[in-house]
Image (cartoon, rainbow, N blue to C red):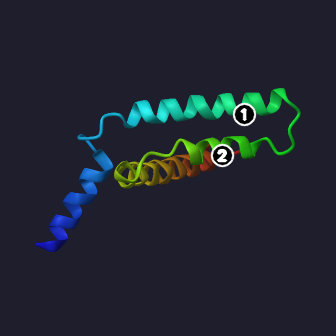
Amino acid sequence: MAHKMTFERLRQLIIAKENPPTLTNSARTAVAVMVSLLVARLFPLPETYWAAISTLIVMQPNLGEALPISAQRFVGTAVGAIFGGFVGMYFPGT
């Protein structure tokens, strides 16, 4: 019974139907990261990637939203890594 409840909770975290702002939060964060990188490159700053990392830290959601978004990001990263691995295997570089 506990295993079923754990699985159901994980499913709710990954799908997160009660958390519709996930896409808008992701889009807003992506735009903010791109703007921070462009500004860092506009001024000749060394190691411009720190601008993006700082933006990600500042734009992180509050603690109540952190667990569902973290679960979604973890699953998205895993799916992207698997997809990238398949693409790398079937379409090798030149």
Looking at the image, residue 7 sits to the left or right of residue 85; the answer is left
Outermost residue toward the bottom in this view: 2
Q: Position of residue 85 (x, y in %)?
A: 57, 52
51 on left or right of 3? right
Q: Quadrant of the C terminus?
A: top right
Q: Please state which of residues 22 and 78 is positioned toward the viewer in this rendering.
A: 22
**Amino acid type of the residue that numbered disc 1 sits on in the rendered structure:** Leu
Q: Amino acid at mark 2?
A: Ser
- The reply to whether callout 2 and callout 1 are in contact (CB within 8 Å) is no
The number of callouts visible is: 2
Observer able to see residue 93: no
Residue corresponding to mark 1: 37
Task: Residue 78 in the image: state x and y as whole percent.
Answer: 48, 54
Residue 14: x %, y % from top left: 32, 50
- Mark 2 or mark 1, which is nearer to you? 2
The quadrant the N terminus occupies is: bottom left
Checking the image for residue 5, the label placed there is: none
**Residue 57 seen in the figure:** yes
Classed neighbour count for the residue bearing mark 2: other residues with Cα under 10 Å, few (<14), some (14–19), many (≥20):
few
Q: CA distance from mark 2 to mark 1?
A: 10 Å
Residues 88 and 32: in front is: 32
Q: Secondary structure at mark 1?
A: helix
Per the image, label 2 sits on a secondary structure element best described as helix
Q: Residue at x 15, y 66 (%)?
A: 4
Which x, y percent locates residue 30? 56, 33
Q: Circle 2 is placed at which residue position?
A: 54
